Image (cartoon, rainbow, N blue to C red):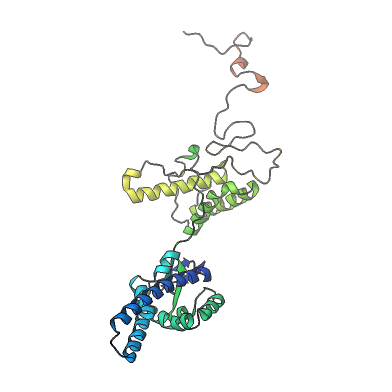
Amino acid sequence: MSELVTGEAVALELRPARLPSRALAVLLDLAVAVAVYVAVTVVLVASTASLDTAAQTALSIAAFVLVLVGGPIAVETLSHGRSLGKTACGLRVVRDDGGPIRFRHSLVRGLIGVIEILMTFGVVACIASLVSARGRRLGDVFAGTLVVRERVPVAPGGYLPPSPPWLAGRFAELDLSAVPDDLWLAVRQYLTRMGQLDPRVGWAIAERLAADVVARTGAPAPQGVPPAAYLAAVVQERQAREARRAFGAAAGGTAVTVPVASPPRAYPVPPSVPPSVAPPAAPWGEAPVTPSGVAPGARPTGPARGGEPEETRKTRSDGRPGTGFVPPA
């Protein structure tokens, strides 16, 4: 990946085309140009049979220049850097700053291409492309252009996991304006790859990112909430706000969630707790469970100490254990 800087100081990440794809595109262009040149030559020979040898030679040279030199220049100018071979290979000629080329760029590339491609059978162009860090030939260097790939294979990316339901609406009043875009990008990348990380490594990354978000927002994270769940809930809140700004009040009560391709089965385990004694991790979407088996903030139910229900520990006025039942008045 090559980083280009535009005139507005905007960095562009472009993938320069390398020698194999460029050579294939040039071969396709040359095959088409030679076929057109042969057809034009046959027509000229048949139509100028009555002329002398000097006139026929002049017409042949003119046909060569127009078809093999002027043709590629005109095609690249009109198509903004795309020829037949480049279109087939997914390539395009752009300026050094990433903008579309003009006639002067195509003219310089075409004239120098006659020397380094046609006259030397592509030897000079291959050597220059191998030496250049961006795979440029001499025509690109003098014209200030670069051949880039337009069709880049897309890697299978992950999806953002939805926020746990028990955190819905917890961060509606959180100020997210101070969180920079690069931090949001880091959080999104972590959430999409959380299931591929080692639990201890994932926990450490989540704690660091959650601490950065807390430092930017100025509000502490809720107690007992795993950092991964906190990050997912904050990202969902940001998506919901962006949806409300984009679509108005119609999206005000709509939660923005993205389906998970391969949802993680559990939160990462804290590295300070050995795996053999660590409490069972809660599946994604459920509240974490404390060692006593009760979710944070939930009221304990069921048997109390000694295995007796709380009602059986109540006593009646005569000192005998009661059932907790109060008869109607």
Residue 106 horizontal side relative to residue 327, left or right: left
The answer to which quarter of the image holds residue 50 is bottom left
Residue 102 visible in image? no
Q: Compared with residue 275, is residue 117 higher up or lower down, i.e. above or below?
A: below
Q: Residue at x 56, y 52 (%)?
A: 211
User: Can the viewer see residue 275?
Assistant: yes
In this picture, residue 156 sits left or right of residue 198: left
Residue appearing at x 58%, y 27% in the figure? 300
Q: Nearer the viewer, residue 45 or 254?
A: 45
Q: Nearer the viewer, residue 48 or 281?
A: 48
Task: Please give the name of the residue rendered at 49% of the width and 66% of the height, measured from the top-left corner.
Answer: 15
Residue that sits furthest to the front in the current view: 50
125 sits left or right of 308 in the view: left
Q: Where residue 257 sits: x, y (%)?
A: 44, 44
Identify whether 267 is placed above or below 107: above
Residue 31 in picture, x, y percent from top left: 43, 72
